[in-house]
Image (cartoon, helix red, strand yellow):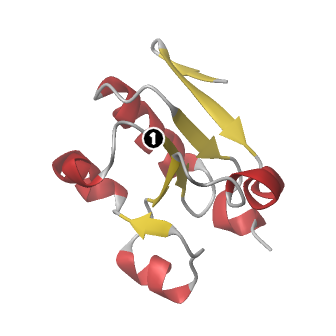
Amino acid sequence: MGWFFGSKFSKISTSELKDYYLKNRKDKFFLDVRTQSEFRTQSISNFTNVPLQSLQSHLNKIPRDKEVVVICQSGMRSSMACRLLKKAGYERVTNVSGGMNHWR
């Protein structure tokens, strides 16, 4: 679990993302918080791109009734996004550790 000033969120590896999460995606929303150009260069199908810098103003695009699985390039921006989502009241938030750097 990741902790930051009381905000707790789950962490998974890219292999867990591939082996379980993408196969069992019915109750999940996949969020990529990299820039649009990073997303266009390489992305995972089923992920929606909302760059971290505009996430706060686009929370209406993210469902509250699903687990939100967040990825970025290395795991830093996605950790920040997870903290922001938790602060905004999202209950089920999961960070993909290592991000796209570890995606194969």
Q: Residue at x 72, y 60 (%)?
A: 23
Place residue 10 in its image quadrant: top right
Name the residue tied to disc 1. Answer: 66
What is the number of callouts on the image?
1
Q: Which corner quadrant holds the N terminus?
A: top right
Helix, strand or loop at label 1? It is: loop
Q: Is residue 56 left or right of residue 18?
A: left
**11 w.r.t. 54: above or below:** above
Q: Residue at x 53, y 69 (%)?
A: 46
Q: Is residue 40 left or right of residue 1?
A: left
Q: Is residue 78 left or right of residue 101?
A: left
Q: Is residue 28 left or right of residue 37?
A: right
Question: What is the residue that sits farthest to the left in this orientation?
Answer: 57
Counting other residues with Cα less than 10 Å from the Cα at mark 1, is it few (<14), some (14-19), or many (20 or more)?
Answer: some
> 21 or 94: nearer the eye?
21
Q: Residue at x 73, y 42 (%)?
A: 12
Place residue 49 in its image quadrant: bottom left
Q: Residue at x 28, y 29 (%)?
A: 88
Place residue 81 in its image quadrant: top left
- x and y percentages locating residue 26 in the rendered image: 56, 52
